[in-house]
């Protein structure tokens, strides 16, 4: 089997096809400290793409509460359990096996197959906290660090560099686009074998029982082709997301928003990188969740990422970029922060948007002389 | 759901064939020998409609072929689920019918998520000649002609392609795009735009007539073809499927089995209840020679 480079694991991995990185790679960064689980992203995707027959249960974008939530049920625990304990070296190299390396001889990818019932509770575990159960009446929030914690995890397809769905399809009906790295299921060739549904560890390939083909997040490619960010990004209420194109670390550009957060600042991390697919959705981990749990989910660089995130208050460039998140529907190819203002530029290097890094404060008297009215302090 | 379908199918079969002599009587003598050579005799019957319980099958020679878990490409089954298919064949001058029987402890039609269908397929070399192509679904430039029956496709043919409300009777849906309860909705074409497989014309998404005709040049290459009037009908009784597949002897552009011809045949079986689909199947590992008399 060919060996391919996986920078997230700092080593070469086995993959059934040769390494061929796309010209550009679609990616989203999420700041988990800001997600409020409003599910606007979920509904934005749903109303745009999955309102048809057979798609009733589908949420190409979903938001689940960790640690108890999971759509489908316990998707992550079940694949981690199958893979078993694996380790990282002290310098960040992955010593364990990926899902393809751990596959038995009869399979292409180590997997579990979700059942019908597993998809039926998309919001299970919502707002349930982890940590030590308190039997004597309620959660104890008075001591630090908190025993009780939870966080929201919004998820789309990760348009992986080494997609398990693509590797598993015996009909070669799944392809990764050269121009933007978006992974698509060819709806003409798919016969609904569901091998991708079994193989994708993130469970982002879904079977449509009405069309009898499998479907998945299409990365909103029609918008992306026009230089516009996906529906689940532009509709995000919490402005926690930015979509762009990520370069591998050896080609990273400091003025590219995604490269900046992932490679330059190293505050955004891939999720479950140990599964070996080089997934391309990246998360700024939540500050107030169990560290061991976060390490399991985001790998060994969690502590450093959180440390650097805490220090952002003294970094006007990073602050500027975080302010640009959610400030435009256009894809920001380059950004710049100068004199307290952050500006995003499109692929033609035309200015898209400029925002202040610190919002100006306006002081307004309660009584408006001009209109002769008293105003409440609400906008 | 499955139970409803079983009953429904059961009733239909009783309706269609109940008037005949029961299947047990017609099942024919037990095969005693492995099938080394499939000799297809002409019978004085109309074979255009498949009928697994037709009395004449009792007089047609039967033999069995050995199957094994598909070993060549992944994903593949860990163990063989179907190790033997009993084969009978006859022709009427225009059509050839193959009657195939194998053990399957549960009936599976697929439909809901994570469900797969029982199925059987037979393949013939598309081109004539003494040397058949690879038994593993042909080879580049040397295709095979496949007839693929699924219990799921048969249900389409008999009951129509199931609506979501048939697959999930307890599900609630407010509305579908272009589909309104008390106002004029969109055209069928407009509605299908919301079903990707249908919108691009994937035959998998449209109602099936029971059997898919497929041409393949090796694994991963199979493509459904416009049918040449092939048909299939199966009954599941007492842990055994009996399926009759009917095809033209001389389909245009297809594999030629005109009387006097020698060809080859191979088989594959899927047990839906064991999550078999696609490359997860049991197959014959060698061709069986066919002589059409
Ligand atoms: S819209 Fe944004 S804030 Fe709301 S749930 Fe989705 S990711 Fe979180
Ligand atoms: S997240 Fe899953 S469906 Fe998406 S590209 Fe990766 S393996 Fe495929
Ligand atoms: S990128 Fe588009 S298709 Fe994918 S989850 Fe977001 S809205 Fe849905």
Image: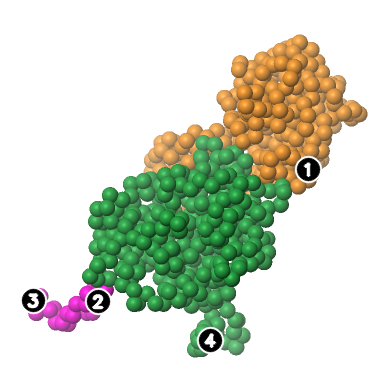
What's the CA distance linking mark 2 and mark 4? 33 Å
Q: Which chain is orange?
A: B
Q: Residues within 10 Å of mark 2 (few under 14, many from 20)?
A: few
What's the CA distance linking mark 4 and mark 1? 55 Å
Instruction: Name above or below for residue B268 compared with residue A285.
Output: above
Q: Where is residue B213 in the image (x, y as percent from the top left)?
A: 63, 27
**Residue at 28% across, 49% down:** A348
Chain ID of residue with mark 4? A
Q: Which residue lies furthest to the right in this view?
A: B32
**Residue at 74% across, 31% down:** B267
Report helix, strand or loop for mark 2: loop
> Mostly what secondary structure, the magenta segment?
loop
Chain ID of residue with mark 1? B
| Pick the front one: A139 or A320 | A320
Report helix, strand or loop for mark 4: loop
| Pick the front one: B285 or A313 | A313
Q: The green chain is which one?
A: A
> Which residue is disc 1 drawn over?
B81
Q: Of the residues tagged 3 and 1, which is closer to the observer?
A: 1
> Which residue is disc 2 drawn over?
A378
Q: What stretch is highlighted in magenta?
A: A358-379
Left or right: where B115 falls relative to A186: right
Chain ID of residue with mark 2? A
Chain ID of residue with mark 3? A
Q: Residues at marks 3 and 4, common chain?
A: yes
> Which residue is disc 4 drawn over?
A140
> Which residue is disc 3 drawn over?
A370
């Amino acid at each position: 089997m060919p060996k391919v480079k996986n920078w997230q694991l700092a080593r070469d991995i086995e993959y059934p096809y040769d390494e061929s990185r796309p010209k550009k790679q679609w990616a989203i960064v999420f700041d988990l400290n800001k997600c409020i689980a409003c599910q606007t992203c979920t509904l934005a995707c749903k109303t745009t793409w999955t309102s048809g027959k057979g798609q009733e249960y589908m949420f190409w974008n979903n938001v689940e509460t960790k640690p108890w939530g999971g759509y489908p049920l316990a998707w992550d625990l079940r694949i981690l359990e199958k893979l078993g304990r694996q380790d990282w070296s002290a310098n960040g190299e992955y010593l364990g096996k990926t899902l393809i390396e751990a596959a038995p001889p009869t399979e292409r990818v180590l997997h579990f197959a979700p059942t019908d019932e597993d998809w039926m509770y998309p919001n299970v575990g919502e707002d349930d906290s982890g940590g030590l159960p308190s039997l004597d009446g309620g959660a104890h929030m008075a001591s630090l660090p908190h025993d009780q914690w939870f966080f929201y995890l919004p998820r789309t397809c990760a348009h992986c560099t080494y997609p398990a769905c693509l590797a598993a399809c015996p009909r070669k009906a799944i392809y990764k686009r050269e121009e933007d790295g978006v992974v698509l299921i060819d709806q003409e060739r798919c016969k609904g074998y569901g091998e991708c549904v079994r193989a994708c560890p993130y469970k982002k390939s879904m079977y449509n029982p009405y069309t009898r083909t499998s479907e998945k997040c299409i990365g909103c490619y029609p918008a992306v082709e026009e230089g516009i960010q996906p529906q689940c990004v532009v509709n995000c209420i919490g402005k926690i997301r930015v979509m762009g194109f990520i370069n591998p670390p050896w080609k990273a550009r400091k003025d590219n928003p995604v490269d900046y957060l992932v490679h330059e600042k190293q505050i955004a991390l891939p999720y479950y990188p140990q599964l070996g697919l080089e997934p391309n959705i990246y998360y700024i981990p939540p500050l107030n969740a169990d560290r061991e749990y976060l390490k399991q989910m985001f790998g060994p660089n969690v502590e450093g990422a959180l440390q650097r995130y805490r220090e952002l208050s003294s970094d006007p460039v990073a602050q500027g970029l975080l302010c640009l998140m959610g400030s435009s529907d256009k894809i920001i190819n380059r950004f710049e922060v100068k004199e307290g203002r952050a500006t995003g530029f499109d692929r033609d290097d035309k200015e898209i948007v400029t925002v202040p890094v610190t919002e100006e404060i306006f002081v307004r008297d309660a009584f408006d002389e001009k209109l002769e009215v008293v105003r409440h302090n609400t906008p | 759901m499955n139970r409803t379908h079983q009953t429904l199918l059961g009733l239909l079969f009783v309706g269609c064939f109940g008037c005949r002599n029961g299947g047990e009587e017609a099942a024919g003598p037990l095969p005693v020998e492995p099938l080394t050579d499939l000799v297809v005799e002409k019978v004085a019957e109309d074979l255009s409609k498949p009928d697994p319980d037709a009395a004449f099958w009792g007089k047609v020679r039967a033999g069995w072929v050995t199957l094994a878990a598909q070993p060549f490409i992944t994903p593949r089954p860990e163990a063989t689920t179907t190790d033997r298919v009993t084969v009978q064949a006859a022709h009427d001058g225009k059509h050839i019918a193959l009657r195939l029987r194998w053990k399957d402890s549960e009936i599976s039609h697929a439909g809901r998520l994570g469900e797969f269908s029982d199925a059987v397929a037979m393949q013939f070399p598309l081109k004539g000649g003494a040397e058949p192509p690879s038994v593993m679904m042909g080879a580049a430039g040397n295709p095979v002609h496949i007839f693929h029956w699924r219990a799921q496709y048969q249900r389409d043919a008999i009951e129509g392609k199931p609506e979501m409300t048939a697959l999930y009777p307890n599900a609630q849906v407010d509305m579908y795009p272009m589909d309104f309860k008390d106002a004029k909705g969109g055209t069928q074409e407009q509605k299908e735009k919301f079903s990707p497989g249908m919108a691009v014309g994937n035959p998998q998404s449209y109602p099936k007539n029971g059997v898919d005709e497929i041409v393949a040049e090796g694994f991963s290459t199979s493509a459904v073809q416009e049918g040449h009037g092939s048909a299939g009908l199966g009954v599941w009784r007492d842990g055994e499927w009996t399926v009759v597949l009917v095809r033209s002897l001389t389909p245009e552009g297809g594999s030629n089995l005109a009387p006097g011809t020698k060809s080859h045949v191979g088989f594959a079986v899927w047990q839906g209840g064991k999550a078999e689909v696609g490359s997860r199947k049991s197959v014959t590992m060698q061709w069986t020679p066919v002589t059409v008399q």
